Image (tube, grey):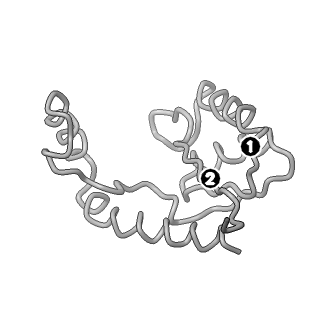
C-alpha cells in the first residue's frame, strides 16, 4: 500500500450568463447556488475561478454554500479550448457538428488552449501534493 489519499478535481462551467456575458442571469445564480449545495458534502480544499466576472460570481455563490472553503482567481481556469480532436477521434454521427462548433472559437483559444490546459494540470497536480 502506498499510503496515498485519493484526490479529486471537480470542474464546472459558470452559470448561465447574460447576453453580454458580463454577469449571471437569475437562472445562472440559482445554478451556482445549487452546485454549491450539491458540493457541500465534498471534501473541497479550494475553489479556483477564471478571470471573467461571470466565473467569479459563480465561484462566490458556490462558496457561500460551503463551510470556509477559500476561493481564488486563476488565469489557468480561464476560457480556452483545451483540446481540438481529430475527426477520427469523434463518433462519426457527431464529428462534423462538433468540429464545426469548435471552429467558431477564436483561433487563439484553439491554438493556445492545449498548452494552457497542460499548465493548469501541472499546477493543480503540484498544488494537491502540498
Q: Residues within 10 Å of mark 1 (few under 14, many from 20)?
A: few
Residue at 66% in and 34% down:
35
Q: Is residue 12 above or below residue 4?
A: above
Residue 116 to residue 46: above or below: below
Picture layout, residue 29 above or below residue 62:
above
- Sequence-earlier tag: 1 or 2: 2
Where, quadrant-wise, is the C terminus in this rendering? bottom right
Residue 122 is tagged as none
Element at label 2? loop
**Viewer-nearest residue: 59 or 119:** 119
- The residue tagged 1 is 42
Label 1 sits on a secondary structure element that is: loop
Residue, disc 2 = 8
Residue 7 horizontal side relative to residue 121, left or right: right
Which residue is most to the right? 67
Residue 5: which quarter of the image?
A: bottom right
Query: Residue 72's x, y, as percent?
Result: 69, 61
Residue 94 is left or right of residue 121, and the answer is left
- Asked if the residues shown at circle 1 and circle 2 are in contact, with their CB atoms under 8 angstroms apart, the answer is yes
Name the residue located 75 percent from the left edge and 32 percent from the top edge: 37
Q: Which residue is nearer to you in this view: 36 or 53?
A: 36
How far from the left and from the top, in percent, is residue 81? 34, 54
What is the crowding at mark 2: few (fewer than 14 residues within 10 Å), some, or many (at least 20)? few
Residue 82: x %, y % from top left: 36, 57
Quadrant containing the N terminus in the rendered view: bottom right
Amino acid at each position: 500500500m502506498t499510503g496515498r489519499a485519493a484526490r479529486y478535481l471537480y470542474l464546472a462551467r459558470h452559470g448561465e450568463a447574460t447576453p453580454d456575458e458580463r454577469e449571471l442571469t437569475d437562472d445562472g445564480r440559482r445554478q451556482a447556488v445549487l452546485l454549491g449545495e450539491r458540493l457541500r458534502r465534498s471534501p473541497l480544499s479550494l475553489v479556483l475561478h477564471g478571470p471573467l466576472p461571470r466565473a467569479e460570481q459563480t465561484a462566490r455563490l458556490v462558496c457561500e454554500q460551503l463551510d470556509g472553503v477559500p476561493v481564488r482567481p486563476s488565469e489557468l481556469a480561464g476560457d480556452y479550448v483545451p483540446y481540438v480532436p481529430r475527426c477520427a477521434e469523434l463518433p462519426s454521427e457527431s464529428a462534423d457538428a462538433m468540429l464545426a462548433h469548435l471552429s467558431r472559437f477564436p483561433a487563439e483559444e484553439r491554438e493556445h488552449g492545449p498548452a494552457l490546459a497542460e499548465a493548469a494540470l501541472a499546477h493543480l497536480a503540484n498544488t494537491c501534493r502540498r
